[in-house]
Image (tube, rainbow, N blue to C red):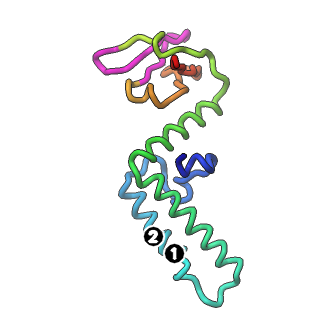
Amino acid sequence: MMAFEQIPKKDWYSILGADPSASVSDLKQKYQKLILMYHPDKQSADAPAGSVEECIQKFIEIDQAWKILGNEETKKEYDLQRHEDDLRNMGPVDARIYLEEMSWNEDDHSFSLSCRCGGKYSVSKDEAEEVTLISCDTCSLIIELLHYC
């Protein structure tokens, strides 16, 4: 189980003070700045115990955020989960579709399905293994992607 799955509602980007579109080098700079600021050894010896505890908690959160966002694979999984959470918040699922019901497009190596609005749902071959929700490229409808067991 991945670290971000243990606390799924944490926004690791906001913990680092970063935008989800930030590059890994930008994320690293923000991480390094924050980790030094909140490092337990950098705290004043005469600081109240409560503020020291808060700094330690913040330090731990910053470290967790970097462990997820600083690794290409875990960052990709986290970003996909965020995207799916956003889609879930947009509204109910319009339909449940098996991947095999979608059309394969050899040119761009993706699966697609026409939406009732005239737009289309599309997902790359790689993403098809990881995502469960796909939004229409034109309207706000969402389908759930199912896989045969």
Q: Secondary structure at mark 1?
A: helix
Q: Residue furthest bottom?
A: 46
Q: Quadrant of residue 91?
A: top right
For badge 1, the amino acid type reads Met
- Mark 2, residue position: 33
Q: Determine which residue is flagged by label 1.
A: 37
Q: Nearer the viewer, residue 22 or 77?
A: 77
Residue 30, horizontal then vertical, whole percent: 45, 63
Crowd around label 1: few <14 · some 14–19 · many ≥20 (10 Å): some
Q: Is residue 125 left or right of residue 119?
A: left
- Answer above or below: position of 89 versus 67: above
**Vertical position of residue 140 compared to residue 39: above or below:** above
**Separation of disc 1 and disc 2 at Cα?**
6 Å
Horizontal and vertical percent position of residue 24: 38, 54
Residue found 40% across the figure and 61% down from its top? 28
Q: Which residues are magenta?
A: 105-123
The kind of residue on which mark 2 rests is Lys
Which of the 4 quarters of the picture holds residue 86? top right
**Outermost residue to the left:** 107
Picture layout, residue 57 above or below residue 84: below
Q: Are marks 1 and 2 in contact (CB under 8 Å)?
A: yes
Secondary structure of the residue carrying numbered label 2: helix
User: Which residue is pictured at 38% across the width and 29% down the height?
Assistant: 126
122 left or right of 106 in image = right
Expressed as whole percent of the image width and height from the top left, the position of residue 84 reads 56, 34
Q: Nearer the viewer, residue 35 or 22?
A: 35
Q: Is residue 54 magenta?
A: no
Q: Is residue 113 magenta?
A: yes
